[in-house]
Image (tube, helix red, strand yellow):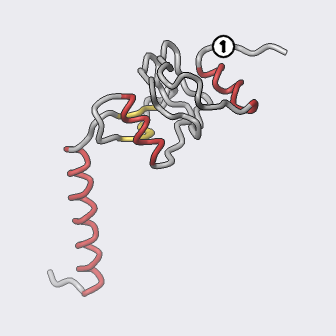
Amino acid sequence: MKLTKEEALKKIEELKKYVADEEAKENKGYIIRKRYDDSEIYVSTKDNVRDAVIEAMSKGVNLFGAYLSGADLSKANLSEAYLSGADLGNAKFYGKGGTIKLKKNQVEDFLNALGFQIEN
């Protein structure tokens, strides 16, 4: 079977993607998953949730709906994190000593993520 140049280049790109995907599978560390359907939000090279969240944040990953229950997030800078809908029940948040300010429009999402219901 003889391929045209365009077909050959397309096959090369498909093979490159296949190899990259296989290498990514081998190098998987901690996987941050959605709390509702268990799908992957972010695949980290790190081996624990704290470092995976920090890595995801450094790459601008949206953690909306993330399952982070019981996560040790001490000393993690979450000041730009979008955690609406995330499950942060029993998560640990100590170590920064209150140096990061929470904006008023972030308070309700933060408390909801911790399992609190806000009443008017």
17, 87: nearer the viewer: 87
Quarter occupied by residue 54? top left
Residue with the most extreme right position: 120
19, 32: nearer the viewer: 32
Q: Position of residue 48 (x, y in %)?
A: 32, 29
Q: Position of residue 107 (x, y in %)?
A: 70, 25
Give the residue at x 47% y 22%. Answer: 95
Q: Residues within 10 Å of mark 1 (few under 14, many from 20)?
A: few
Q: Position of residue 36 (x, y in %)?
A: 52, 27
Give the residue at x 45% y 27%. Answer: 75
As drawn, is 102 to the left or to the right of 49?
right
Q: Amino acid at mark 1?
A: Phe
Q: Position of residue 30 (x, y in %)?
A: 32, 33
Q: Is residue 58 above or below residue 93?
A: below
Quarter occupied by residue 104? top right
Give the residue at x 58% y 29%. Answer: 99
Q: Is residue 115 above or below residue 35?
A: above
Q: Is residue 119 above or below residue 13?
A: above
111, 74: nearer the viewer: 74
Quarter occupied by residue 84? top right
Helix, strand or loop at mark 1:
loop
Residue with the most extreme left position: 1
**Number of residue marks:** 1
Q: Which quadrant is home to the N terminus?
A: bottom left
For disc 1, the marked residue is 116
Give the residue at x 40% y 41%. Answer: 55
Q: Which quadrant is home to the C terminus?
A: top right
